[in-house]
Amino acid sequence: MGEYIIKRTLQMTVVFFLFLVFSYLLFNAIPGNAFSNLLLNPDLPPDAYNRVLELYGLDKPLFERLQLYIVNFFKGDFGYSYKSFPKTPIELISERLPRTLMLFAIVNIVSFYTGFFIGKILAWRRGSQSETWITLTSVFSYTVFYPWFALMMLWVFGYKLGWLPIGKFLYPEKWYDAPFDSDIVFSSMIKFTIVVSLIQFAAYLATRGIESLSSRRNLRFASLIAIFIGSYFYWNNGAALIKKPYAADIAYHMILPVMVVTIVAFAGTALLTRTTMMEVLKEDYILTARAKGISQKRIRDRHAARTALLPVVTSFIFTIVTIIDGSVLTEQIFSWPGMGQLLLQSVLEEDIPVAMACFSFVGVFALVAHLLADISYSYLDPRIRIKSQG
Amino acid sequence: MSKEVLSVKNLNMHYETLSGDVHAVKDVSFSVKEGESFGLVGESGCGKTSVAMSLLQLQADNAKISSGSIVLDGVELVGMNESELRKVRWDGISIVFQGAMNAWNPVVKVGEQIREAIREHYPEKSKAENTEKIESLFKMVGLDAAVIDRFPHELSGGMKQRAVIALALSCDPKVVIADEPTTALDVVIQDQILNEIKKVQELLGLSLIYISHDIAVIAEMTDQMAVMYAGSIVEIGPTDKVFSTPKHAYTRLLLESTPSVVGEKKKLRSLDGEPPSLINEITGCSFSPRCPDPSDDCKNQNKEMKLVEIEPGHFADNCCVDCG
Ligand SMILES: Nc1ncnc2c1ncn2[C@@H]1O[C@H](COP(=O)(O)OP(=O)(O)OP(=O)(O)O)[C@@H](O)[C@H]1O
Ligand SMILES: [Mg+2]
């Protein structure tokens, strides 16, 4: 396994290098850039002009610039933003990225679980009335024109009903005299989410080996309750207590985008799960499981859904890869100041160092996600063995 | 005489299909005693698997048991609800399916799949006890204990089949059904598996229902047997009696079309024609269209199909007993 990962990482580095070269050449092919616009400014004194040229190395020939860019890139130096000098692309990204990841991690987890759950039920109840209706609804939400749908939801929940905020990720007036930055609150929310998921995962692993099904279930349930109580104490004590109203504000702003994207995103998972699981249900081992006297619910979850999981996870990982580029539309509609907006802005404003950094980030993200996908397959399906020679 | 474990009386089952009802099991009655092995033989499509599935009440969604009774150890199975049936399955009757190669869930370890069955019926057993049980079963069917931690795709066909037998025995069922357990295996392995089943059956004193289209295998494996044709039992009795004095024309044809089961070498006879479609209700003798030398009664469909006792314990259908 270790050998496999090293090998894949090397391969990925080569792919990434090519990716970088092509992106650079593509950006270079755009006529003009924010920087040359700046140079057109007749009020700029000549020595300033030269200093700027030197600072950004723009007077060098293309090949030399490319070389320099790549060397600097692997040193971790992405240059400076043209638009928001002296901020670096890294600074801009590290401010925006958590907001996007938080939003879309939640969307993906929620839509994966609802999609998988609904697909499972649909396959199980095939032929029933409810199955027909839910399948039709899923097909609708799978095919609906997303921007239109998002705007409709905004109009209904934000404007007509007025239940949810229309955009942004916080109410600025509430944060006017906040003792800290929104990013600090945000990062503690992320940390909290990660810790909770890890604890739950650990509880799941720890109870795996218990032979009696009922005590396994009870222990898992108890751990869930413990997590709830723990969270309650965490948010009502110490430093977290002060952050609580602000965290709540952010969470409140997340409801609508999470809801809208989930409604659109769950359907793909649900329909795919339904199809694969209907195939699995025809398999002989489902009959064996029934003959063994296993409960219907356990056959559904443990035998049918478990085996149907692989293609669903594959397609899910491909959706994760598109989180950042897919977020462009969503963040634009909900005025969510994340990576998607940064990417769009930097391209429109021809802020090339930032745009390049954003794209490289997307590239790295995609490559790593694929590696993780391949590794997770071997756990999901023992028939797939990762060979280091492969 | 040992007592009856399983008794099936006048069982009727049909599949509802778009082109009409398929009467796959017609008025089938038989019983299995403790420690006895019972064979069910007949050509493909005659309804053997349908009988087996009805015993477990695992028939397909479009199947309906219209009448009859299945009594296991004094308990009626027909009409039981799902949760009562779940208790009977595997603990009361277990089955080795036809094509048991695909009986294993590919993503769960073999040991875990056996454990799951035991856990369902004996939740109080500890993990160590279950492991011990599985290991002893594996030993009995000639498998290595390490197979517990293997995934199904890591086993050969023969090993999978042995493991399926271990699985079928895991809850000490009262009756085990083996539905053509050796199809899809090569001849050598087939033979080994048959010996294994026979050995286990004698060792544990199992009540076994052995289903096959191969009458030679039935001869080797069973004490009592029934011959099925087009959904009905046409001859039933002690295996040696059926073999030495076959009464029904179909049984005789089956025996003659099988090489060297009994007696001296004869020219093999082949069975012409197709079994009748089970969609239409057949009145009169179902075998008469294929009967090589039908009696008048058989040809003219004079008699209803009905088993008559020829000698103690040996029955045959009365419309074809006199045919040549
Ligand atoms: N789900 C079903 N729906 C409709 N007809 C069915 C169904 N299952 C079986 N049949 C029909 O019922 C009849 C008996 O089938 P069954 O599987 O019991 O035969 P079998 O004796 O086990 O044959 P084989 O030796 O090939 O396994 C066949 O004509 C078959 O086509
Ligand atoms: Mg069959």
Image (cartoon, rainbow, N blue to C red):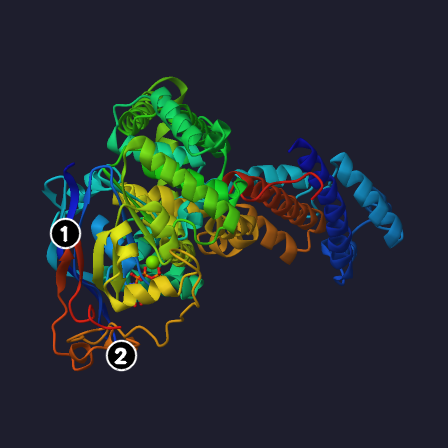
Q: What type is the residue that disc 2 sits on? A: Pro
Q: Quadrant of the N terminus of chain A?
A: top right
Image position, residue A176 (x, y; %): 42, 34
Image position, residue B235 (x, y; %): 22, 60
In the image, is A373 to the left or to the right of A133? right
Helix or strand or loop: what does disc 2 sit on? helix
Q: How many marks?
A: 2
In the image, is A126 to the left or to the right of A374? left
Helix or strand or loop: what does disc 1 sit on? loop
Going from N to C along the chain, the mark reached first, 1 or 2, is: 2
Q: What residue sits 43% from the left and 25% below the top? A: A202
Label 2 resides on the chain identified as B
Q: What residue sits 38% from the left and 54% below the top? A: B216
Q: Nearer the viewer, mark 1 or mark 2?
A: 1
Q: Is residue B251 visible?
A: yes
In the image, is A275 to the left or to the right of B222? right
Residue that badge 1 annotates: B312
Mark 2 Cα shell of 10 Å, populated few (<14), some (14-19), many (≥20): some
Mark 1 Cα shell of 10 Å, populated few (<14), some (14-19), many (≥20): few
As drawn, the residue found furthest toward the top would be A238
As measured in the structure, the alpha-carbon distance from the residue carrying label 1 to the one carrying label 2 is 29 Å
Residue that badge 2 annotates: B289
Q: What type is the residue that disc 1 sits on? A: Pro
Image position, residue B38 (x, y; %): 26, 47
Q: Is residue A173 visible?
A: no
Q: Quadrant of residue B105?
A: top left
Image position, residue A88 (x, y; %): 68, 39
Q: Quadrant of the C terminus of chain A?
A: top right
Relative to B81, is B307 above or below? below
